[in-house]
Image: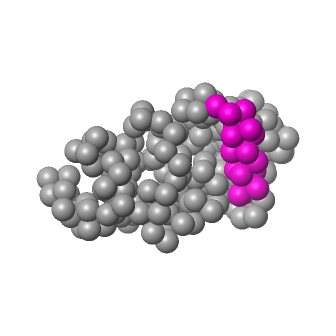
Amino acid sequence: MNNPHPVSDLMDEARFWAIINQSLAVAEAAHEYGDEQQNAQAAALADALAELDWQEIAAFQNRFVQQHWFSYRQDLWCAAYLMCGGCSDDGFDYFRYWLVSRGEAVFQAALANPDSLADYPFVSADSNYYEFEDFGYAAHEAFEEKTGSEMSEYLDNAFTYPEMEFEWSDDDPESMKRICPKLFAKFAEQHL
């Protein structure tokens, strides 16, 4: 790499979602579930990112960070808490990685209404299914393999999270039910 400058470009949103959707399609075609599906999708994403140059990988990551930022909301945290049987700060990050990994349609529907996730096919009783930590690191790993450098040195994004005011509490299940009634009906009995 010749004296690289910070990359602040965002990958074209349609291209970003096409890469995500293709990685999901590969995993679903393998008819794998749970960890196996996530492993297959992470591998498919790694293969797709390996085809890009380093600037494109950084632009992909910038778009990923933007989508992750868009989903930093208390109502989605309520959904994550219900689906995962609890949700720490890190767990909420991993849940939002999973949410992006489900593709544009599921992601946008969840932004419009987090309770829409109750309609997502339930494929695993393992609450960890709704977290996908490795997905959030795929671009970093692809960048390092391509360049031998850590991508964080070349990113120039300024996303800071706002202070979050919660309208729900795990001590008040009814408050969670008000925000996500269908998810509450589907998951509360097994997790709360």
**Which residue: 76% across, 48% down?**
22
**Which residue: 75% across, 64% down?**
14
The image quarter containing residue 66 is bottom right
**Which residue: 46% across, 47% down?**
95
Residue 39 in the image: x percent, y percent? 63, 30
Residue 108 in the image: x percent, y percent? 57, 66
Residue 91 in the image: x percent, y percent? 39, 42
The image quarter containing residue 104 is bottom right
Is residue 167 depicted above or below 118 in this figure?
below
Which sits in the foreground, 29 or 146?
Answer: 29
Residue 16 in the image: x percent, y percent? 73, 57
Determine if the magenta segment contains residue 105: no
Q: Which residues are magenta?
A: 16-32
Q: How many marks?
A: 0
Which sits in the foreground, 71 or 52?
Answer: 71
Q: Is residue 53 left or right of residue 62?
A: right
Q: Is residue 66 left or right of residue 20?
A: left
- Can you see residue 165? no
Q: Is residue 159 left or right of residue 7?
A: left
**Which residue: 47% across, 36% down?**
124
